[in-house]
């Protein structure tokens, strides 16, 4: 399997089952986090929900600022 720029071989072993679950957990939450960093309101809500549900999940949460501050930077 190739997803997000990395590859994974699934050989049917018990170890591959564990690795697949870990990879899917990372891949899905990484996608949600990226969308949250882009200021997507639904993604912000979804990642907050997952952070509350899963104590082992660690992400850098976005720091939102007013649009006018960003607009006046350039």
Image (cartoon, helix red, strand yellow):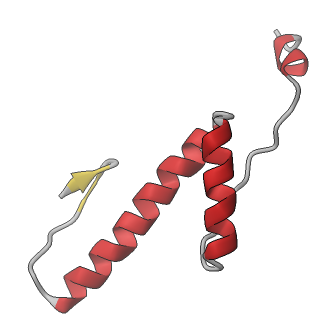
Q: Quadrant of residue 42?
A: top right
Q: Residue 3: image x %, image y %?
A: 28, 51
Q: Quadrant of the C terminus?
A: top right
Image point (9%, 78%), residue name: 11
Vertical relation: 45 (above or below) 11? above
How far across and down, in percent of the image, does residue 2 sit?
21, 53
Is residue 59 in view?
A: no
Q: Is residue 40 above or below residue 5?
A: above
Q: Which residue occupies 70% across, 56% down?
A: 60
* Residue 30 location (% of width, % of height): 50, 54
Who's the residue at 63% across and 74% down the image? 53
7 vs 46, left or right, is: left
Q: Viewer-proximal residue, 45 or 70?
A: 45
* Left or right relative to 54: residue 19: left
Left or right for 53, reference 19: right
Q: Which residue is more in the foreground, 40 or 57?
A: 40
In percent of width and height, residue 43 lies at 60, 45
Residue shown at 86% from the left, 14% from the top: 73
Q: Is residue 25 left or right of residue 71?
A: left
Residue 57, above or below 74: below
Position above or below: 46 against 71? below
Q: Nearer the viewer, residue 68 or 42?
A: 42
Q: Is residue 51 visible?
A: yes
């Amino acid at each position: 399997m190739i997803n997000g720029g990395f590859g994974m071989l699934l050989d049917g072993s018990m170890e591959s089952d564990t690795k697949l679950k870990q990879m899917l957990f990372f891949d899905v939450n990484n996608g949600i986090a990226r969308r949250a960093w882009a200021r997507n309101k639904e993604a912000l809500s979804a990642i907050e929900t997952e952070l509350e549900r899963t104590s082992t999940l660690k992400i850098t949460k976005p720091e939102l600022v007013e649009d006018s501050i960003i607009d006046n930077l350039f």
